[in-house]
Amino acid sequence: MSFQVKLKALTIALLVSISSFFLLSSAFCPIFAQTAEISAQPQAAQTAEVTVTAPAAEAAAPASQPVPPAEVKPEIPAAPAEAKIEITGELKSIEIQAPAQTAEITATATVQPAQTAEVAAPAVTPAPAPAAEVKPETPAAAPAPAPAPEAKPAAPAKKAVKFTATPDTLFITPGSTCDLSKVKLEVKTPEGEIKPVSVDSWSADTGSVNMTTYTPPTAAFKGTAALLANYTYAGETLKTELEIKVRKPYIEERLIVLYMALILAIIILLSINKATGGKNYFIRRIGGLNAIDEAIGRSTEMGKPVLYLTGLSDMSSISTIASISILSYVATKTAEYETSLLVPCCRSLVMNTAREVVKESYLEAGKPDAYNAENIKYITDDQFGFVSGVDGIMLREKPAANFYLGHFMAESLIYAETGNSIGAIQIAGTSEFSQIPFFVAACDYCLIGEELFAASAYLSRKPKDVGTLRGQDIAKLAIMVIVIIGVVLETVSVINPGMASSLGLYKSFFQTK
Amino acid sequence: MFLRKTLPLLICFFCGVFAIVGFFSAEGTAINTYYEKLAKWNSIIAAFAMLLGVGNLIRVNFIKITRNHHDKIYCAILIASLLITATFGILGGVYPTKIDPANPQLMDFFKNKCAYIFEYMMKPMQSTMFSLLAFFVASAAFRAFRAKSFEATILLVTAFIVMLGRVPIGTSIWPGFAGISEWILSTVNMAGSRAITLGAAVGATAACLKIILGLETRYLGGE
């Protein structure tokens, strides 16, 4: 007998043993199948300890026979069976210890007056015990809860008059005044009628206000001013709040991001311009991208399909768009080699985009007949539902090359290990830092971070793509310089604390909100 | 050509520029208001696209059933599950609701069923898939940590130290493991993490710029 067969037999035996154990346990230990109902009407947050008794005949029933239903009344003192009920706080747990005929029940519950708490509890005797109904009816000796007070019919609530300002927040720029006539003031009467009103007066916590205009305290004031509108309705003074936010029309703290993005954009556009002008740039070798042709060739030789995943994200993710660009190249190759390309999708928009891209690639390769729309299908938006679907495809179709390029989360290792188990050549790439180690460990090739975005340039070698890549590299160089200056300043400020202010200025330049 | 290429590129350009301006505009400005609306449009479009996905799912699996595919039983289960869950969800609501037995309603049968399916079927199945990770991590680590080369040996030693620093037995062997482990994670690992993140951010920015300016058109199909 082979090892695998032995292992199977051992597993089956183990499963049978576990099942038998649970079946026998439930047969001989009626603990699993019994309930006790506790009906109580204590006041909130009261504690009651009640000793209750079951009739002796019931308590002494033979173990083999089912004990008839026992109604346990707290008034009867000193009996063979005892139940202690403690009710306090929120309903959390119930414990029962059942030595012979004595039942000790500790239940913890918060019960509002005139409510009923039902607690599932295990059995109290070795024999199958019936449902026990324990009713703490406020025995004289025990500190039982007081009976619930009878609910009095509530007096009809007086409907309030509502005074509102729409909008409740206004925005103005520093140095300007706020026109309060834009604010719509309304009163909702108890009858439900809404009528526009004019305010009696305004008051402000800062700055000055008259009936129509709010003026901030200073021209340079930035922040929030709280205004109060006062209106008298049927002799009652009503108030409503209005916030006035004084701020610039743009977010100043984000301006550094805009400057950096503009610099990056200029660098990239200049690089594209140079590249389209005939300048030839060197691109370092990226192993994962070189292996794409090899992987597709292997699939063709083996007569097996190629599997391509674009990740979990929708078309709004830049990783997915980068992945779709690579899919275009892969589809062209699979069309040339007449190899089947499977693209299960987690998002329906991605599926439609992928279909268009693959169809165009097959057309470009001159193999429109080889395109099969059914190979690009939507599975589910659910993360692990999608994982199980893809794993199923891998195990059934046994692709010879798997591509995982895009945005991946916890499921990355499940794909990679399943792909590894079927012997597929695997090329992965993601910008998600936390998933890179899994792909590095389990895949043959891995595109790390920016390599995913550089892939389209690397594969196409078109001037506009290569120029973009060149621009990226220059931007990275600039970032490296900024980081190195920061490190030097930080080190110097530790040695010479007098330099700390320079470091602070440097840091504040790059801080955003 | 105009509808397939030029118009999408124009829409992409205007939406991209508008999103950038909206990101820098302050709360309450007209641009910011429309910028927030644009984000909502995205969700609405995605919701409509869901219909496409569901339609595709039903079509693909239905074709398999009619063609007597060997997986037809699974296709049937999938379609049945989809329809049952959707029926309960649409007619009875997605979230748990209270049913008043004293005042029975026509739709009471459908209520809470969708929440029940999610709680007692979806969640356990999701957990089952997720729990596979425990075994996959072990098998991947076994392959990755084989000291085949100098780099793999460094990986093995580092991983061993980090693991010892994170488990009680490691600190009981030598308390210094915790400190070394923390240093590796907060200094060496963090430096690598930030380098990759910065590179990816620059790459993403460049890719966005290419898309907004219409230099990248592969996602529309073809060059």
Image: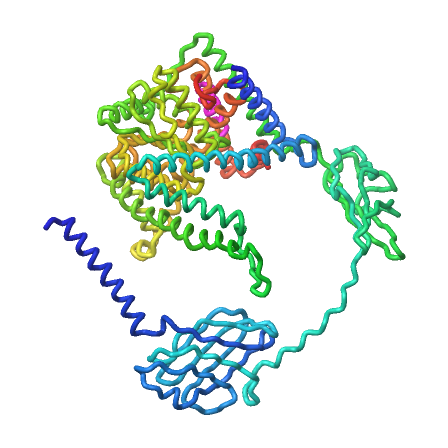
Is residue A10 one of those drawn in magenta? Answer: no
Can residue A499 be seen by looking at this rendering? no
Can residue B41 be seen by looking at this rendering? yes
Residue lying at the far top of the rendered structure: A278
Residue lying at the far front of the rendered structure: B66
| Closer to the camera in the image, B36 or A23 | A23
| Closer to the camera in the image, B97 or A449 | B97
Residue A77 in the image: state x and y as whole percent. 48, 91
**Scheme of colours in the image:** rainbow
Question: A395 left or right of A212?
Answer: left
Please tell me whether the stretch drawn in magenta is mainly helix, strand or loop.
Answer: helix
Question: A285 left or right of A472?
Answer: left
Count of picture labels: 0
Residue A389 in the image: state x and y as whole percent. 36, 40
Q: Which residues are magenta?
A: A469-484
Is residue A479 one of those drawn in magenta? Answer: yes
| Closer to the camera in the image, B1 or A93 | B1
- Residue A209 position by quadrant: top right
Question: A197 left or right of A424?
Answer: right
Residue A458 in the image: state x and y as whole percent. 38, 20
Residue occupying image coordinates x 37% and y 71% = A33
Residue occupying image coordinates x 53% and y 82% = A136
- Residue A41 position by quadrant: bottom right
B173 w.r.t. A473: above or below: below
**Looking at the figure, which quarter contains the C terminus of chain A?**
top right
Residue A311 in the image: state x and y as whole percent. 41, 35
